[in-house]
Amino acid sequence: MIKEINIGCASTNTSYGKRLDTTLVELNSKANVSALFTSNKFKSAPVQVCLNHIKTKKKGRKILAINAGNANAATGKKGISDTKKLAKEISNLSGVPISHILPFSTGVVGQLLNLKSLSLAFNECFKNLNKNSWNDFATSIMTTDTKSKIIKLPVKIGSKKYHIVGVAKGVGMIEPNMATTLSYIFTDLKISDSILKKMHKRICDKTFNAVSIDGDQSPSDSSVLVATGTSEIDVKKNITKIEKDIFSVFQKLSEKLVL
């Protein structure tokens, strides 16, 4: 649906048996990425690494690396070291600079990652790039979710089209004041880095940040908005409609967390 995004999923064969639980999402060199993270003072190791990697705009391909089953939170320096080690392995596999690898983890808190199983799984993810679907992606990030959460929105303006696809996970440890869950929203629109970040913050504040289930805020909460820049739609001319459409995907995903 969205050109120049490749998805590869695999299973570690650990927490969820043979179910998919690891994902790589490869983004094209033109893609702009906005990421928002938990305001919890005790941030997970992947969030800390992501915050460092996302500091400056990245030119070239980028990869989102996600594992479910272990949040790698409350794991100290070893947790950060393990996250960096996996990012380095993915960098070596893909040829993408390590600072362009954005890691995300969700699941049990306080346990160290099983590096061997994750290394093997991410290797399989890399082999599977462009072989897996959005539905596979939505399934692979689930933890205690009873069903996957995915929204697909094709939009037509005149004779031209653009697309928005969003996936999310989350049913517990959800509290206002940050993304409240893991959420990944993608569009093929060409949106500048600065506009994308401002739009993301506005929309997130009105959707995911307004949701609460059990009063706990996870140390792993993350929200990502990606614009690949492959659509020919005039963004400046249609910016009001575009923001409404992206908002609607965020809103529908956030509603799926509580319904």
Image (cartoon, rainbow, N blue to C red):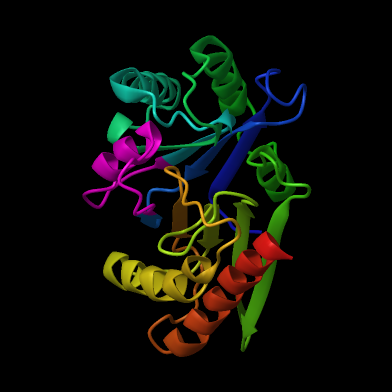
Examine the structure image and report whether residue 229 is included in the region drawn in magenta.
no
Quadrant in which residue 13 is drawn: top right
Q: Nearer the viewer, residue 212 or 152?
A: 212
Q: Nearer the viewer, residue 172 or 93?
A: 172
Quadrant in which residue 219 is drawn: top left
Q: Nearer the viewer, residue 183 or 165?
A: 183
Q: What residue lies at 47% left-to-right and 25% top-to-bottom?
A: 110
Quarter of the C terminus within the rendering: bottom right
Q: Nearer the viewer, residue 118 or 73?
A: 73
Residue 205 shows in the view: yes
Q: What residue lies at 61% left-to-right and 49% top-to-bottom?
A: 172
Residue 181 higher or lower than 165, as above or below: above
Rendering coords of residue 116 (x, y %): 53, 10
Residue 164 higher or lower than 114, as above or below: below
Magenta residues span: 37-62
Q: Is residue 237 left or right of residue 99?
A: right
Residue 13 higher or lower than 161, as above or below: above
Residue 191 shows in the view: no
